[in-house]
Image (tube, helix red, strand yellow):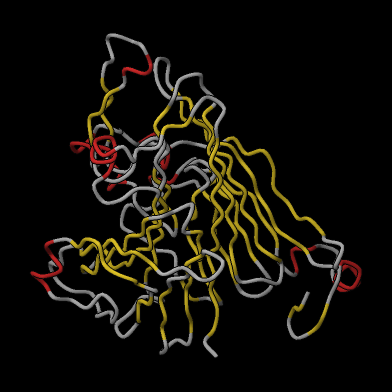
Amino acid sequence: MRLHGHDHDRGSLARLAGDLGAAGGIRSVVLDDGAERGIRALEFRTGAGLSFDVLVDRAMDLGTAEFRGRGFGWRSATGFRHPGLHEYRDDDGLSLMRSFSGLLLTAGLDHTLFGAEVDASQYRYPPRGTVSNGLHGRVANLPARLTGYGERWREDGGCVLWAEGEVRQAAIFGEHLRLTRRIEADLDGTEIRLTDTVRNAGFDPTPHMYLYHVNVGWPFLDEGARYEAPVRRTLWQSDSVAEQGVSRTDMPGPLPGFVEQVYEHELEPDADGRARPRLVNERLGVFFELEFDTTQFPAFFQWMHLREGAYVVGFEPSTHHVGGETEARANGTMTFLAPGEERVYTTTFRVGELD
């Protein structure tokens, strides 16, 4: 490992400090005030200047995130709201907007994108012939069962910080899906590696949709920042794009009354099948990059919400296109997991300084 200009392994670090925390590590805490009260969190910190929080009671999503003292994980006015305050059917299915903050909000596990009422006859319960889904599904406000966290030393002398947990989305006469999430960061690294496994733990064919809402805020996002993506073509854009005419690549400062602009892009993957869209801030000399597998996430959305007080851009790899569940069921592209079937998603969040 390269730390503070010197090469280190487990032995050399032990000579310098009696606790690995001098270089980095993970600390388990419980948030204890306001709407966040009671949320378990894991504070990751690397020796290369990356720090981020894993919100255990919010599906192990990523909350606060900083690189060398500069924030990049979006902080909204909602804060990291305890899931016990969440009412799924509130605000006509838009209740997610009352707990929407942080670097990563996971959407799924059976529904993403806008709300829809869909057939549920596969569960064979006559009083519940349909199921009503709100914006981006239920998973983001479900607590995880934390199965472990700590550090793992590799044979090459490096150290990996890790955490793992399971989120269970289940109902009697309904879905039984389980998300196993593993999060890793090298002790000397500036990237977050996410491995998610979604499994149908039930005995009925079950809908599955999945989307990462990755949200980058100030100060990485600022006037003059540049949104870069290997766009092959744009498949869809919201009406607000033509109405407002704000560039999708060159970011302005916060705008009064800005209406979100959303695009669905078809991205050009690298030779390894992965795409790497990013946000570049030349004034600060930093970048944020999201790397994902385009076979796992064949769709990608760019979200721009540049309004005063809620200033953010989003990177959204998705298993399904903008028409969502209703359209996917109609055209035969909806994913149904058979009993015991699973899907694996591998994604990297990367920050760094520009050369």
Q: Is residue 197 above or below residue 71?
A: above
From the viewer's perspective, tell me whether residue 305 is left or right of residue 13: left
Q: Quadrant of residue 350?
A: bottom right
Residue at the outermost top position: 126
Picture coordinates of residue 129 (x, y %)?
26, 16
Image coordinates for residue 215, horizontal then vertical, percent: 38, 62
Residue at 35 percent of width and 82 percent of height: 225
Locate the C terminus by quadrant. Answer: bottom right
On the rendered image, what quadrant is the N terminus found in? bottom right
Viewer-nearest residue: 153 or 72? 153
Which of 274/86 is in front?
Answer: 274
Q: Is residue 197 left or right of residue 133?
A: right
Of residues 62 and 262, the one nearer the viewer is: 262
Which quadrant would residue 303 be assigned to in this image?
Answer: bottom left
Percent x, y for residue 145?
Answer: 59, 35
Q: Depth check: 161 or 272 in front?
A: 272
Across and down, in percent, residue 339 comes to 52, 24
Residue at 69 percent of width and 47 percent of height: 149
Determine the image quadrant of residue 35: top left
- The residue depicted at 46 percent of the width and 59 percent of the height is 294
Q: How many numbered discs sit on the rendered protein?
A: 0
Tell me the residue at 36%/11% (across/down). 124
Q: Is residue 83 visible?
A: no
Asked if residue 192 is positioned above or below residue 149 in the image, the reply reads below
- Most extreme residue toward the left is 243
Residue 263 in sight from this viewpoint? yes
Indicate left or right for 289 with 26 as reference. left
